[in-house]
Image: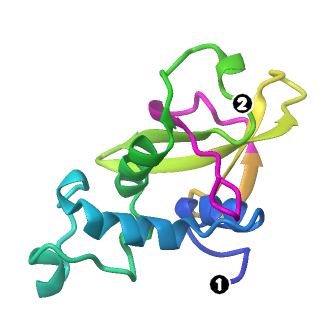
Amino acid sequence: MPASTGVCTDEVIRAYRAVGVDLRKEVHEDMPADRTAYPRRWVTSRRVSAGGTDTNIDHRRVPNWMVFFRRHGTSLPLSADPRDYQPGDLVAWNLGGGIAHIGIVVDQKSAVSDRNLIVHNIGAGPRTEDVLFNWKLIGHYRYWKTAAGS
């Protein structure tokens, strides 16, 4: 998929692939390991309704990422202090209407607020913006892993 297309979860996948970690694969391997830990909102086929997964879409569901990061990363407290959000942290928001969004904190700072910027994609292609507090925060995670698995 071209870097100019995709959804918010694709930005997270691309960021980790750049350092040799295939999060898409890891999510798809973790879901069947404990299917009950993951949301059951999206039953799209008989295989999925029987407890399987849908490798075409499950990695694009923000609630699935939130479960994965709680299970395999560090779930951090939500905070109104922008200094608590460090480069590499993952942030999830509730956009309203049952829509979740995710982005990754980067080491670039806003010239206006001095906050770290967020790489995300909310339908207009990948963006690096000062959006940390634009929506209701629902998740804050750290997931450190190298390509070698440490």
Residue at the spot x=50%, y=27% of the render? Answer: 76
Q: Secondary structure at mark 1?
A: loop
Q: Secondary structure at mark 2?
A: loop
x, y percent for residue 38 = 25, 56
Above or below 5: residue 99: above
In this rendering, position of residue 101 left or right of residue 36: right
Residue under pointer 2: 86
Residue under pointer 1: 1
x, y percent for residue 135 = 50, 34
Above or below 63: residue 35: below
- Magenta residues, start to end: 129-150
Closer to the observer: label 2 or label 1? 2
- Colouring convention used in this rendered image of the protein: rainbow
Dominant secondary structure of the residues highlighted in magenta in the image: loop
Q: Which residue is outermost to the right? A: 111
Above or below 24: residue 96: above
Residue 16: quadrant of the picture: bottom right
In this rendering, position of residue 42 left or right of residue 113: left
Residue at the spot x=73%, y=75% of the render? Answer: 3
Three-letter residue code for mark 2: Gln
Q: CA distance from mark 2 to mark 1?
A: 28 Å
Quarter that holds the N terminus = bottom right
Q: Is residue 140 magenta?
A: yes
Viewer-side residue, 20 vs 140: 20
Residue at the spot x=63%, y=13% of the render? Answer: 81
x, y percent for residue 150 = 65, 53
